[in-house]
């Protein structure tokens, strides 16, 4: 099946590296123009150059802290001007933040809520009206498998990601009559920028590090997933091929989650 997104316009937070860049690349290779939002200007420009070379599509970049409501509103206005409209929004900004419950400070809780939940709330609220008016839209919230199956020591991420799953269902219910489809993709263990940063080269090759992680986490497929595999799932959901899927939370985890 050839999944195409010709003529569509996508906006992706956390778009300069890892899963965000992988999704942007896949969308562009399928025919969409994309806007990338991230904090790091140099990485954004590097991603832009790489994606344009791989796809021939237009790529726009926006330096923004998505925790800042005014900055996010300004970026949305600029992106609409550049892209013409926003058909697809991917709320991908975030990082892994876990710890023992009693040791997580109020400041850490608030930052996690602002970054992982409120940024998605605000950007979705900005793009939703135009999607409804055009009677076509896609919103994808990138969460993780702790949203369904939280474990001890996984706060605040498991809590904010669970809230993101509830947000997905609320938006799906309100968007469905207008053909605005909203879904969540729950990350398991995917080879991405955060694991590259955590790997210590003194401990051996990166491939061995990933293999050991898969064994330690008891991933049924026996390996860590690739960003490209994750991006392919997102591309399907954002295309016409996924036109009857909304209000779902799909595990992209090699079978790792105990909850379907």
Image: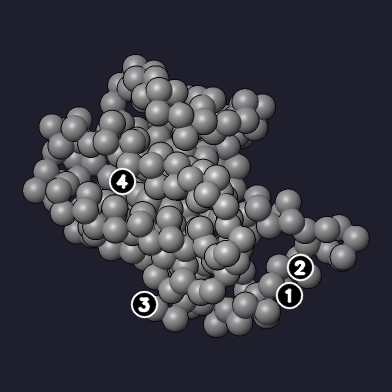
The colour scheme of the drawn protein is one colour
Query: How far apart are the alpha carbons under marks 3 and 2?
Result: 27 Å
Label 3, residues with CA under 10 Å away: few <14, some 14-19, many ≥20: few
For the residues labelled 3 and 4, the Cα–Cα distance comes to 21 Å
Q: Residues within 10 Å of mark 4 (few under 14, many from 20)?
A: many
Q: Please tell me which of labels 1 and 4 falls first in the chain.
A: 4
Residue where numbered disc 4 is placed: 139
Check disc 3 and report its element: helix, strand or loop. loop
Q: Separation of disc 1 and disc 2 at Cα? A: 5 Å
Q: Secondary structure at mark 2?
A: helix
Under circle 4, the secondary element is strand
Q: Position of residue 103 (x, y in %)?
A: 61, 61
Nearer the observer, 140 or 101: 101
Relative to 161, does residue 254 appear above or below in the rendering?
below
Can you name the residue that lies furthest to the left here? 177
Using the image, tell me which numbered label, if any, was put on residue 10: none
Q: Position of residue 61 (x, y in %)?
A: 51, 25
Between 79 and 49, the one lying in front of the other is: 79
Q: Of callouts 3 and 2, which one flags the residue occurring earlier in the amino acid sequence?
A: 2
| Residue 236, visible in the rendered structure | no
Q: Whole-Å distance between the Cαs marked 4 and 2? A: 33 Å
Task: Determine contact: label 1, label 2, CB under 8 Å.
Answer: yes
Q: Provide the residue designation for mark 1.
A: 212
Which residue shows up at 36% across the image and 77% down it?
A: 260
Horizontal relation, residue 46 to residue 199: left or right: left
- Pointers 3 and 2 in contact (C-beta within 8 Å): no
Q: Which residue is mark 2?
A: 209
From the viewer's side, name the closer residue of 198 and 27: 198
Give residue 37's position: percent from left, percent from top.
49, 32
Q: Residues within 10 Å of mark 1 (few under 14, many from 20)?
A: some
Residue depicted at 87% across the width and 65% down the height: 203
Query: Helix or strand or loop: what does disc 1 sit on?
Result: helix
């Amino acid at each position: 099946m050839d999944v195409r997104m010709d003529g569509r316009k996508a906006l992706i937070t956390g778009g300069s590296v890892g899963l965000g860049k992988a999704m942007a690349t896949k969308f562009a290779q399928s025919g969409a123009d994309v806007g990338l939002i991230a904090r790091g200007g140099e990485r954004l420009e590097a991603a832009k150059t790489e994606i344009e070379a791989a796809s021939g599509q237009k790529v726009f970049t926006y330096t923004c802290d998505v925790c800042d409501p005014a900055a996010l509103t300004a970026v949305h206005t600029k992106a609409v001007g550049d892209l013409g409209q926003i058909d697809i929004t991917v709320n991908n900004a975030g990082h892994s933040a876990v710890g023992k419950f009693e040791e997580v400070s109020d400041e850490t809780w608030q930052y996690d809520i602002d970054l992982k939940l409120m940024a998605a709330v605000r950007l979705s609220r900005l793009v939703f009206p135009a999607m409804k008016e055009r009677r076509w839209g896609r919103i994808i919230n990138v969460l993780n498998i702790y949203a369904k199956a939280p474990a001890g020591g996984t706060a605040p991420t498991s809590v904010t990601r669970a809230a993101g799953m509830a947000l997905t269902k609320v938006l799906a219910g309100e968007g469905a009559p207008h053909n605005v489809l909203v879904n969540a993709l729950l990350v398991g263990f995917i080879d991405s920028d955060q694991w590259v940063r955590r790997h210590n080269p003194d401990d051996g090759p990166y491939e061995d590090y990933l293999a050991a992680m898969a064994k330690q986490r008891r991933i049924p497929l026996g390996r860590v997933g690739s960003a490209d595999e994750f991006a392919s799932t997102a591309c399907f959901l954002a295309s016409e091929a996924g036109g009857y899927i909304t209000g779902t939370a799909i595990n992209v985890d090699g079978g790792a989650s105990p909850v379907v």
